Image (cartoon, rainbow, N blue to C red):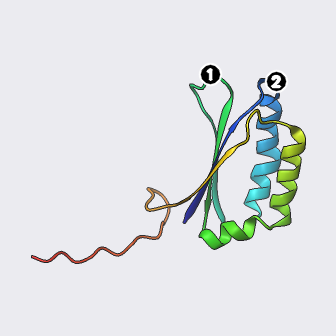
């Protein structure tokens, strides 16, 4: 499993619009893309300025890369950019999941211990 983590600092005057956009446009679009397994849209609680995180979990790296070319992905990105919600360029990270509580992440087999 791979996690696509995305951090965005929003314009103060656009926070309500962005939260609505995220729930009504981005989340439904991601849900329709093959390989997307879970989405968490998070507002940073103690941030002085509006800041949001997206944690999007993909079946594997190939699914994430395929999603980037999906018309649903491209359309929601186009709408996001047109909304001018962000104050600074968002930070993007692609991470390999090494373990989870509720889901199944690929695990590397343990080497046998010699005694």
Which quadrant would residue 56 be assigned to in this image? bottom right
The quarter in which the C terminus is drawn is bottom left
Name the outermost residue toward the left.
Answer: 115
Determine crowd level at label 1: few under 14, some 14-19, many 20+ residues with C-alpha closer than 10 A: few
State the image coordinates of residue 55 (x, y, percent, origin top left).
61, 50
Q: Residue at x 60, y 26 (%)?
A: 47
Name the outermost residue toward the top.
Answer: 48
Q: Residue at x 88, y 39 (%)?
A: 83
The one nearer the camera, 67 or 34, is: 67
Q: Residue at x 14, y 77 (%)?
A: 114
Q: Is residue 97 above or below residue 54?
A: below
State the image coordinates of residue 38 (x, y, percent, origin top left).
62, 57
The one nearer the camera, 7 or 54, is: 7
The answer to whether residue 107 shows anywhere in this view is: yes
Q: Is residue 95 left or right of residue 14?
A: left
Q: Is residue 109 left or right of residue 11?
A: left
Q: Which residue is mark 2?
A: 13
Q: Is residue 16 left or right of residue 42?
A: right
Q: Earlier in the sequence, mark 1 or mark 2?
A: 2
Which quadrant would residue 28 be assigned to in this image? bottom right
Q: Residue at x 61, y 69 (%)?
A: 61
State the image coordinates of residue 97 (x, y, percent, origin top left).
49, 61
Q: CA distance from mark 1 to mark 2?
A: 14 Å
Label 1 residue SS: loop
Which quadrant would residue 1 be assigned to in this image? bottom right
Name the outermost residue toward the front.
Answer: 89
State the image coordinates of residue 105 (x, y, percent, origin top left).
48, 66
Determine crowd level at label 2: few under 14, some 14-19, many 20+ residues with C-alpha closer than 10 A: few
The answer to whether residue 34 shows anywhere in this view is: no
Query: How many numbered callouts?
Result: 2
Q: Which residue is mark 1?
A: 48
């Amino acid at each position: 499993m791979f996690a696509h983590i995305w951090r965005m600092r929003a314009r103060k005057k656009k926070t309500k619009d962005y939260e609505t956009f995220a729930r009504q446009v981005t989340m439904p679009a991601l849900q329709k893309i093959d390989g997307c397994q879970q989405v968490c849209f998070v507002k940073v609680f103690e941030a002085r300025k509006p800041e949001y995180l997206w944690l999007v979990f993909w079946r594997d790296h190939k699914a994430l890369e395929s999603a980037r070319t999906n018309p649903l992905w491209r359309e929601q990105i186009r709408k996001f950019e047109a909304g001018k919600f962000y104050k600074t360029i968002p930070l993007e990270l692609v991470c390999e999941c090494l373990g989870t509580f509720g889901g199944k992440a690929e695990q590397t087999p343990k080497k046998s211990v010699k005694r």
